[in-house]
Image: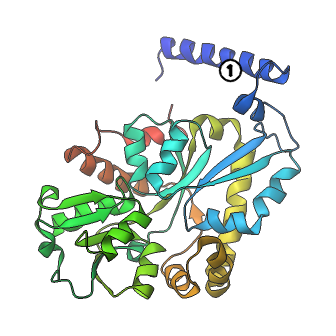
Amino acid sequence: MENMLLKTIRTWKLIAIGALLLMVLSGCSGGVQQQNAVAEGKNGSKAKVFRIGYQKYGVPNFLKVRGGLEKRLEQDGVTVEWTEFPGGPQLLEALNVGSIDLGHTGEAPPIFAQAAGAPLVYLAHEASRPHSEAVLVLKDSPVQSIADLKGKKIALNKGSNVHYLLVKLLEQAGLQYSDVKPVFLPPADARAAFERGSVDAWAIWDPYLASAQKNLDVRIVADGEGVVNNFEFYLAARSFAENNPAIIDALFEELNKAGDWANANHKELAKLLSPQLGIDIPSLELASSRREYNSVPISDNVVAEQQKVADTFAKLGLIPKPIQVKDALPNHK
């Protein structure tokens, strides 16, 4: 139950927000505030601009290419802005500082972001895809198992889904996280370090994983099967989601239309994305074959799985404090 003080604070916050919005409408404010001024449309949307963060590969990526969301929202006077990020941690940092309104990431980045105080809210997730991330070594590497990585350098994107994968694989092999030497690099830099032998292994996700399999002499030491879920989540700034339900509803309707099409058209999807992503068609076909694209609401079971991720990172001291994932659900205040 909220106490009276919290209710009073919230009331004054709403009054302050209302005053600010009135200033915006009267032309007394500029920049981002002016862009996102209240402008009630046919469907009750409030924001004039919907800023979406996306990564190299996923449903938002080809929703952008197809243009369905823009057509859906233009009748309401809402424009869509897209920003690409190299990984989930970078995307959620942008969400935290207010540069985007919504984005999609793997299971680990939201944990780091929530622990850092980001005002995010979970909206939906895609199906588990444990084969879409793995730890790779070069084909002639002496490393034959995760246990052989003791004392070795492993390239990975800090705070990403493969960060959790690595922790769980080490645990399964009887190793501590401190037994290996993580080298934190974004995917492009990690691949370069991996190819030149500066690191012993690379923990990576699709489509970079598929590209390495198709174009480099590599071996998969282990993927996520039986170890992690590798969910992908859609998250938004809480204030944006609460103030713009019509936009959020429109997004997920269009995402699922695009997802239905993608599930039935892997080859066409690869051809569509290849020029945009700069990744060859065979690699994208391989990546596409390992996943389903539809999004579904967050369930209690998924929250429980996310809590395991959070508790693991807290135990290792990788996040500054323990968190409760349920605090980032839509109905939690």
Q: Count the numbered circles shown.
A: 1
> Residue 220: horizontal and vertical position, in percent?
30, 82
Residue displayed at 44% across by 87% down? 214
What residue does disc 1 label? 17
Relative to 304, residue 56 above or below: below
Q: Residue furthest front?
A: 196
Q: Is residue 165 visible?
A: no
| 215 or 314: nearer the viewer | 215
Q: Nearer the viewer, residue 147 or 324?
A: 147
In the image, 176: left or right of 187?
Answer: left
Residue count near mark 1 (Cα–Cα under 10 Å), binned few <14, some 14–19, many ≥20: few
Name the residue rendered at 43%, 72% in the picture. 129
Residue 255 place in picture, x, y as percent: 67, 63
Question: SS class of the residue under badge 1?
Answer: helix
Under mark 1, the amino acid is Ile
Residue at left 73%, top 30%?
Answer: 31
162 lies above or below 48? below
Tell me: 92 left or right of 249: left
Q: Position of residue 288 (x, y in %)?
A: 54, 80
Q: Nearer the viewer, residue 310 or 279?
A: 279
Among the 4 quarters of the image, the one containing residue 136: bottom left
Residue 322 is at least partly visible in this image: yes
